[in-house]
Image (tube, rainbow, N blue to C red):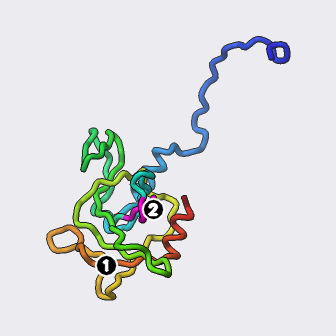
């Protein structure tokens, strides 16, 4: 190869600046600014956590995202300094999907810390859960927190469109 190209000569190249692209951190911060309280988000989980629910779990946000000023442990998970996180509640799949593919969920009462970076960011329309009971809506109980135990449905078409993004 030396015969074809000559000797290797070390060179230092100046790094291109202001190339017109936002960094991934800026894009993540922009996404975090779009998140609002009571928004349903899809969170990608690791393969060892995927069971019948798959690698997408759903959560409803309790507050706006924040940037951590120091590393934090929450429910056995480590969150690093500078990470963007939001508090929320998981939706829990109840039983197996129906014959038509629809899935039934309930909101769990425990507050969890969610890593904004693990949330799907390509969703252009909100994820909508329909209440199994037409009078029920995902809403806050008096004194804060979400009502738990209410059953919500996620249609197969919504599920399929989300998992197709992976």
Residue at 42% from the left image edge and 65% from the top image edge: 52
Q: Is residue 14 above or below residue 99?
A: above
Q: Quadrant of the C terminus?
A: bottom right
Foreground mark, 2 or 1, reads 2
Q: Is residue 10 left or right of residue 31?
A: right
Magenta run includes residue 104 = no
Q: Farthest residue toward the bottom?
A: 134
In the picture, measured across the screen, residue 4 lies left or right of residue 66, that is right
**Which residue is drawn at the image coordinates 42% and 75% (left, top)?**
103
Q: CA distance from mark 2 to mark 1?
A: 19 Å
Spot the residue most to the left: 143
How many discs mark residues in the rendered view? 2
Residue 64, percent across and down? 31, 58
Toward which corner of the image does residue 114 lie, by quadrant? Answer: bottom left
The range drawn in magenta is: 51-58
Numbered label attached to residue 87: none
Please identify the quarter of the rendering in which residue 161 is found: bottom right
Q: Please identify the dominant SS of the magenta region.
A: loop
- The image shows residue 162 at horizontal and vertical percentages of 51, 66
Residue at 29% in and 87% down:
135
The residue identified by callout 1 is: 151
Q: Compared with residue 80, is residue 113 higher up or lower down, i.e. above or below?
A: below
Residue matched to label 2: 54
- Where does the image place residue 73, in percent across and percent down from the top left? 25, 44
Crowding near pointer 2: few (<14 within 10 Å), some, many (20+)?
few
Classify residue 14 by image quadrant.
top right
- Name the element at disc 2: loop
Q: Establish if 149 lies above or below 7.
A: below
Tag 1 secondary structure: strand
């Amino acid at each position: 190869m030396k015969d074809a190209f000559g000797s290797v000569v070390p060179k230092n190249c100046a790094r291109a600046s202001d190339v017109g692209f936002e960094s991934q951190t800026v894009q993540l911060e922009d996404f975090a600014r779009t998140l609002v309280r009571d928004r349903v988000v899809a969170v990608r989980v690791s393969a060892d956590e995927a069971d019948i629910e798959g690698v997408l779990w759903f959560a409803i946000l309790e507050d706006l995202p924040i940037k951590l000023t120091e590393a934090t442990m929450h429910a056995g998970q480590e969150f690093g300094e500078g990470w963007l996180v939001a508090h929320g509640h998981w939706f829990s799949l109840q039983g197996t999907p129906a014959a038509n593919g629809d899935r039934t969920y309930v909101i769990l009462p425990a507050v969890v810390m969610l890593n904004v970076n693990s949330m799907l960011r390509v969703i252009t329309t909100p994820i909508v859960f329909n209440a199994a009971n037409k009078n029920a809506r995902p809403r806050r109980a008096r004194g804060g927190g979400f009502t738990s135990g209410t059953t919500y449905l996620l249609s197969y078409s919504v599920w399929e469109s989300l998992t197709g993004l992976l």
